[in-house]
Amino acid sequence: MSNHKRVLIIDDDADFRAVVSALLASEGYDVVEASSGHDGLAHIGEIQPDLVIVDVMMESAAEGYGVSQALRFQPQFARLQDVPIVMISSIQESPDELFARASEVGMIRPDRYLTKPLDVPRFLATVKQLAPPAVAT
């Protein structure tokens, strides 16, 4: 078994998943892909990711928020609640900006929020900060 950090990418855009997967693999990460929030959550227990990257708009306009809320607060994901979440979306406003007056915004807040098109250096710095790559021995 690899000692590399495992990243789960949940996004309905196959091209985006392929590009980000290749980028992360080139940086030494093991990458697993899911094409929907439902698919990602259904397999997350066996995947055991060190980091989750999730889009907001997939099968529904707010699906990524549901994934974030589920991982943080649903009992079946309790052992994964500390896994960092990076939300990446074409929505330019973060959840904190979009839902500034909502007291429940903390229930969907990711650890980091990035926008598409992806700023690759910023994205890689974010990933390395939240899930530092394994050091070769």
Image (spheres, helix red, strand yellow):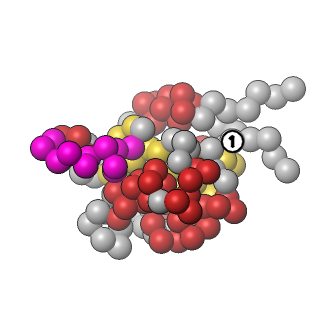
16 relative to 28, above or below: below
Please say whether residue 93 is visible from this viewpoint: no
Residue beneath the point at 47% across and 60% down: 74
Residue at 61 percent of width and 51 percent of height: 79
Q: Report the front residue among 9 and 37.
A: 37
Q: Of helix, strand and loop, which one carries label 1?
A: loop
Residue at point 62%, 44% (across, down):
50
Asked whether residue 75 is in view, the answer is yes
Residue drawn 30% across the image and 71% down it: 60
| Residue 3 shown in magenta | no
Range shown magenta:
99-110
How would you classify the magenta stretch by its main secondary structure?
loop
| Residue type highlighted by circle 1 | Lys
Residue that badge 1 annotates: 5
Report whether 74 appears left or right of 27: left
Q: Residue furthest front?
A: 75
In the image, residue 9 lies at what x, y percent?
53, 55
Residue 124 falls left or right of residue 22 = left
Relative to 1, does residue 46 appear above or below in the rendering? below
Q: Position of residue 8 (x, y in %)?
A: 57, 54
Could you say where residue 135 lies in the image, as x and y percent from the top left?
Answer: 76, 27
| Quadrant assignment for the C terminus | top right
Dot 1, crowdedness within 10 Å: few (<14), some or many (≥20)? some
Asked whether 100 falls inside the magenta stretch, the response is: yes
